[in-house]
Image (cartoon, rainbow, N blue to C red):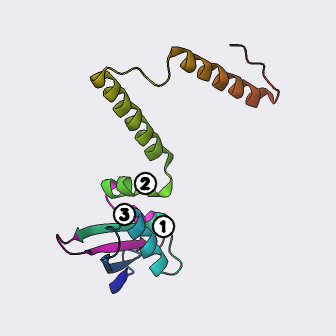
Amino acid sequence: MEIVKRKENPLLNRVELHFCWEHSKSSTPTLSDMVAAAAKAEPGSKKELTFVKNVNTRFGRPQTTGIALIYADSESATLEPTYVHTRHESLHGSKKAEKAEAYKLQLDDLIDLVQKRKKPRAGFEEGRRAIIIANAASKSLKSNKFEKINF
């Protein structure tokens, strides 16, 4: 990633990096790649306060351009619209985004099973046993004792 222009914006408490990424020998960089590279390019910055916007990859050219906005603190970062925060949440290990992705994958799998009339990988009995184990683990954690599992 090459920083084409660096601008400090004290009014918004952020640094704005205009970048150009040549990727002739690799794939187009992901959002995660761009955030990591931008945070690395600005000393003292944090990935969770780095937002990449206006990304443009030119058709037929291995070149991606964009802007990375690096905020000094989380309060200043609230200036970014909600959709930008949502897009970047999964990069920072957001539990909410991880759960949403897990549910989406489960629903996609269920739809695929129904449409193709396939049997599920795990049946009722496997589900029942998983719940018994999870309940025993929860009870053991609360009581700080081993719990016997009866199937």
> In the drawing, what numbered circle is on residue 56?
none
Question: The N terminus lies in which quarter of the figure?
Answer: bottom left
Residue range highlighted in magenta: 57-82
Q: Residue at x 23, y 70 (%)?
A: 57
Mark 2 belongs to which amino acid? Glu
Q: Which residue is drawn at 37% across and 72% down?
A: 69
Mark 2 and mark 3: Cα distance apart in space: 11 Å
* Circle nearer the viewer, 2 or 3: 3
Mark 1 belongs to which amino acid? Lys
* 2 on left or right of 127: left
Q: Splitting the image into 4 quarters, where does residue 109 fall?
A: top left
Answer few, some or many: residues within 10 Å of disc 2's Cα (few below 14, many 20 plus, some between 14 and 19).
some
* Relative to 6, residue 122 above or below: above
Which residue in the structure is indicated by mark 3? 31
Picture coordinates of residue 10, whole percent (x, y): 39, 80
Which residue in the structure is indicated by mark 2? 89
Mark 3 belongs to which amino acid? Leu
* Circle nearer the viewer, 1 or 3: 3
The secondary element bearing badge 2 is classed as helix
Which residue in the structure is indicated by mark 1? 47
- Relative to the observer, which residue lies in front, 16 or 124? 124
